[in-house]
Amino acid sequence: MTIDLFFQYLFAGVTYGIIYAIVAIGFNIIYNTTGIINFAQGEFVMLGGMISISLLPFVPLPVAIALAVLVTMLVGAAIEIIFIRWLDNPSVLRLIIITIALSILIREGSLHIWGESIRSLPYFYGNEISAIAIGSVRISPQVLWVIGVCGIIVLGLSLFFKTAPLGREMRACSANRTAAILCGINTRNMVTFSFMLSAAIGALAGCVMSPITYTQYDSGTPLAIKGFTVAILGGLGNSMGAVAAGILLGILEAFSISVLPLAYQDVIAIAILLIILFVRPHGLFGSSEAAGLKEF
Amino acid sequence: MKSSKFFGITILVVLVIGIQLVTKATETTYYLTQLTMSAYYGLVVIGLSVLMGYAGQISIGHAGFFAIGGYLSAALTTHNLINIETSSVVQFCKSIGITIAGTDLYGEQLLVIAPWAACIVAVLTATVIAFVLGIPVLKLKGHYLAMATLGFGIIIFRVGLASEYFGEADGISEVPGFTLLPAIAGLPALTVSGDFGNRAQNYYIAWGLLIIGMILLLNLIDSRMGRALRAIHGSEEASAAVGVNTASLKLSVFVLSAVYAALAGVFLTHYNGGIGPHEASVMKSVRYVALVAVGGMANLWGVLIMGVTLTFLSLRGVFGSYDDAVFGTILILVMLFAPDGILSIRGKAILTKLKKT
C-alpha cells in the first residue's frame, strides 16, 4: 500500500467515523436522561436527509436544512409524547420493542412517501469532482463540512450541558431522577427535550452526510447499528469517547476493504460490537466501577 | 391442569383435520399451502415464546437460526459434489452412506448429500452456534442483549448475502424434497416438498411437527424447569438465591428455541424448494418478536394462535404493500395497551374500569 493510498483510506475512515460518532451522540443524549436506547435513532438521520431533499426545490439549502432539523425535532417530540411519556414505569423489554416498532413505522411511512429511490442533497460547496489537496491527498470539500459540523455539535453540546440552565437540568435528571424532581425539575419535560435534541442532531447529521452517503428510506438501520456500536465502544453516555470510538471504527472499516470483500464490511462493525459487549461492556474509555452501578 | 392441556391439543388436532376436510369439500385446497408455511413459522414463534415470555430473554436474531437451518440443508442437498468426488471428505460421506447419486435434468452426473443427513447437520450446526453464542450473550441484559442478538442476525444475513456458496442475493433454489418415510407396504412415501399432489400430506406433516413441538413445550413449562424459568423472569437474583442455576437454564432454553427455528428452516426450505437472504433479514426477526408479543409472550396458546393467524394473513397478501407497517402497528399497539398480549384483553375488566370512572 502506498503512502498516498494509506492517507486516502485514512480520510475516508475518519469521515465515516465522524458520521457514526454523531449518531452515537444521539443515542447518548437520550440514554443519559432516560436510560432508554432509542432504536429509532437511525430513522432521525434518514428523516433529516429526506426532508431537506424534499424542501430543496422550494427554499435555499441552509433554510431547507434548518426546516428539516426543525421538523425532525418535532417528530422526536411527538414520538416521546405519544408513545413513551404516559407509560407507567415501563420495563426495558417493552421500551426496546416500542422503539423498534417506531423505527419500522417511520421507515415504512418514508417508503410510502418517498419511494425506494436513492436521493441526495447537492454538495454544499463545489461538486462531486471538486477536491481540495492536502499534501498529496485529495479530499472532497464535503468531508470538511462533515468534520466541521460534527466538531460544532460536540463543542456546542458540551457547552450546553455545562452552562445552559436547560442542559444542567437535563444532567441533573440523568444523575438522580428523584433528586431532580425534589429540586423542582420537571423530569418528564427533560425527557421530551432529550428526544428533541437527539432528533435534531440526527437530522443535522443526515443533511450534512447526504451528499457523500446518499439517503434512502432504509438507510437508517445500518447507521443506527454502527452508531450503537460506537456508543458502546466509547462507553455509553460518554460523548468524547463516542468521537474517539467513531473515528476508530471508521478507520478499521476503511482499511478492512483492502483485506476483505466489500460485502463483509458491516460484519466487521458487528463483530467488534459483539466482542466489546462480551469483553468490555463498559466500553474502551468507560470505567468498570461506574458501569457496575448501571443496569445492562 | 393436565386435562386442560390435553383438551387444548385435542381441539387443535380436530381443527387441523377439520380445516383440511373443509378445504377439500369447498375445493379451496390452495389455502393449505399458506397454512403449511404458517405452521412452520408457528414452530419458530412458539420456541421463541419460551425464551422471551418464560425465561424473559429477548432475541432479535432468531431469523438467523432459521436461516442457518434452511441455508445449510439447501446448500448441502443442492450443490453437486461430483467434481470433488475424489476428495477425502466426499469419500468419507460416501462411505457412511449419506450421499445420493443421480442425474440432473440435463443427464449430468449428480452427487449430493441426502436430505436427512443435511437436516441433522443443519440442526446440529444451529445447536452448536446457539450454544457458543449463548454463553457470552445471555450474560447481557436489556438493550445489550437485544443489540447482541440483532448483531448476530445481521452477521448471518450478510454471510448469506455475500458468499457464493449460499447463492448471494439470489439464494438457493431447486432444493429437492425431503423424504421422511419411504413408501412401504402400499403406503405412499412421506415427502416434504412443494408438489401440488403432496399438498394435503405436507399440511399434515407441518401441523404434526408443530403439534409435537407444542406438546413438548407445554410439558416443559409445566415441569420443574418451567417454574424455574418463570422465576428467572421474575427476578434473576432471587431465583439464583433459591438455588436455580440461572446461567445454564437460560442457555438451555436459548439452544432449544434455536433448534426449533433451525428445524422450521430446514422443513420450510424443502417445502418451498428454496431459500433467499430475506429469510435472515432483521425484519423477519422483528416479526417473530412481534408475533410472540401479540400472543402474550408467556402464553404458548396465545402465541400459537396469533402467530399462525397473522402469518397466514400476511402470506395470503391481505396486508398488501403495508405488510411491514401492519406488523409495526400491531407491535406498538400491543406494547402500549396490552403488554400481556391481545388475548389478555378482557371485555369485562374494561367495562368495570369504565364503570368506576
Image (cartoon, coloured by chain):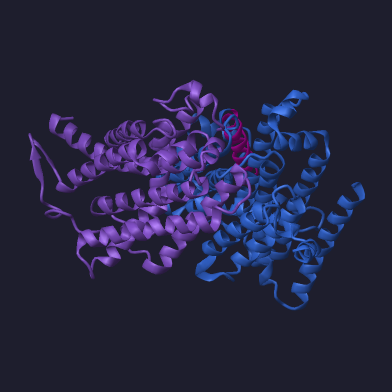
Tell me the quarter of the picture where residue B54 sits: top right
Q: Is residue B121 left or right of residue A170?
A: right
Above or below residue B304? Residue B111 is above
Specify start and end residues of the magenta stretch as a single range.
Answer: B114-135
Above or below residue B168? Residue A9 is above
Q: Residue at x 35, y 49 (%)?
A: A202
- Residue B100: tell me if it is visible: no
Chain A palette colour: purple
Pinpoint residue A12: horizontal percent, then vertical percent: 23, 40
Tell me the quarter of the picture where residue B20 sits: bottom right
| Of the pair A209 and B18, the residue shown nearer to us | A209
The residue furthest top is A289
Q: Is residue B53 left or right of residue B15?
A: left
Q: Which chain is blue?
A: B
| Of the pair B345 and B299, the residue shown nearer to us | B345
Q: Is residue B133 magenta?
A: yes
Q: Residue at x 60, y 65 (%)?
A: B315
